[in-house]
Image (cartoon, rainbow, N blue to C red):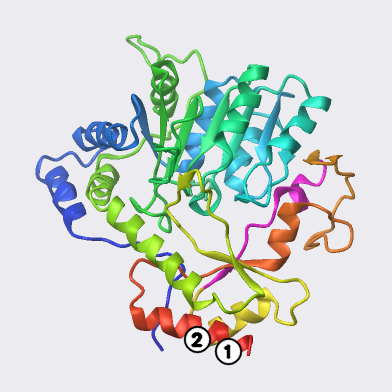
Amino acid sequence: MKRIYLSSPTIHGDEQRFVQEAFDTNWVAPLGPNVTSFEQEMCAYAGCSHAAALSSGTAAIHLAMKCLEVKEGDIVFSSDLTFSATCNPITYENGTPVFIDSERDTWNMDPEALKRAYEKYPNPKAIIIAHLYGTPGKIDEIMAIAREHGTPVVEDAAEALSSTYKGAKCGTFGDIGIYSFNGNKIITTSGGGMMVSENKEYTDLAVFISTQARDQARYYQHSQIGNNYRMSNIVAGIGRGQLLHLEEHKAIKKKIYETYREAFADIPQIKLNPLNPDGDANCWLTCMTIDPDCKVTPNDVMDALAEKNIESRPIWKPMHLQPVYAESDFFTTDGLQPNTAPQKGDNGDDWDKSIGGDIFRHGMCLPSDIKNTDEDMEIITDTVKSLFK
Ligand SMILES: *Cc1c(COP(=O)(O)O)cnc(C)c1O
């Protein structure tokens, strides 16, 4: 049986051209002309001034924490409903993540819950917001709160490359933006990431630290701890080729969302992930939630798809429900949610009153692969629909 993927790499051939160029000129090394060009081309695409190409999106977030001087004990407000790479880098620098619940309109950080967090923690070192599944969050509201308190903002746009909000690209609103080119993202370099900013000091520092923080000296001298986080010239070649097809990928992802919307229009128990009316989402993954009163659960749908060799996955499990973050504070619109130290595997059913937890328990991600044919989409939607008959 043919495998239908959630979101796998789509390679076109242009990538090979840039990689070949690197081979032909013996630039099979870190750095090199593809890295510089990829940074320039990403800046031109995203509409920002400076970029640093790095080994992963996680590395980019880690360096963002270093640029903003997050240190031991510093509070950093983070999206709660997201992939763990959004907030793990806070802990790499011994900072303390404080999680903020989602709102229902875009599934992203809730500005009202963010205000509640400031009541307990008036001086956070930074805020990191993720644009989940490619849908831009309530950027104006969050930026206004952050500016009022003088808190720098990092935008985790790992899933939202090419998404726009009021006409500008996600990743360019905060003080620092980050992108990921992991294998399942909208474009890939096999693995890679990028930091973008209007502030050259940040991207310069990211380049410096990502190449082992070597001082300008005759000897190998270091005044600061470095990382080996720079993107290689081969990887950047793949990125340059992929970037030429980014808009095309976005158009196909949006069409996939539209296909699901039409297919499930007459099933009132199914709702797709909301799109922000102030933006244009890249629809990286189409997700759905099922009415809690419905006898069909997301697990039933995922099992039925798996039987037909179709890949799907749960919604990200919120950070406040993760055993590793059991001690962390978590704010909803009602204020601090009591820490009931969830057990391993606990999905929070009985006690969790959060919006993110609710989306997690009743939602799932549908296969959103660019290479899905019309027949593939029909098999998927028929399989889902058959459960609701
Ligand atoms: C993929 C992803 C990352 C991490 O990017 P990598 O390149 O895989 O390190 C960070 N945040 C979010 C929201 C992601 O989806």
Q: Quadrant of the N terminus?
A: bottom left
Q: Which of the 4 quarters of the picture holds residue 290?
A: bottom right
Q: Helix, strand, or loop for circle 2?
A: helix
Q: Provide the residue span drawn in magenta.
A: 312-327
Residue 84, image x, y percentages? 62, 48
**Label 1 Cα crowd, 10 Å radius (few <14 / some 14-19 / many 20+):** few
Question: Which label number is shown at residue 386?
Answer: 1
- Residue at figure coordinates x 38%, y 46% from the top left: 162
Asked whether, in this view, residue 386 is left or right of residue 42, the answer is right
**Label 2 Cα crowd, 10 Å radius (few <14 / some 14-19 / many 20+):** few
Q: Which of the 4 quarters of the picture holds residue 209?
A: top left
Residue 197, image x, y percentages? 42, 25
Asked whether, in this view, residue 65 is left or right of residue 28, the answer is right
Residue type pointed to by label 2? Asp
Relative to the observer, which residue lies in front, 183 or 177? 177
Q: Is mark 1 within 8 Å of ligand 1?
A: no
Q: Are marks 1 and 2 in contact (CB under 8 Å)?
A: yes
Residue type pointed to by label 1? Ser
- Residue at figure coordinates x 50%, y 74% from the top left: 311
- Residue at figure coordinates x 39%, y 45% from the top left: 192
Question: Which label number is shown at residue 87?
Answer: none
Identify residue for label 2: 382
Residue 214 visible in the current orientation: no
Q: Quadrant of the C terminus?
A: bottom right
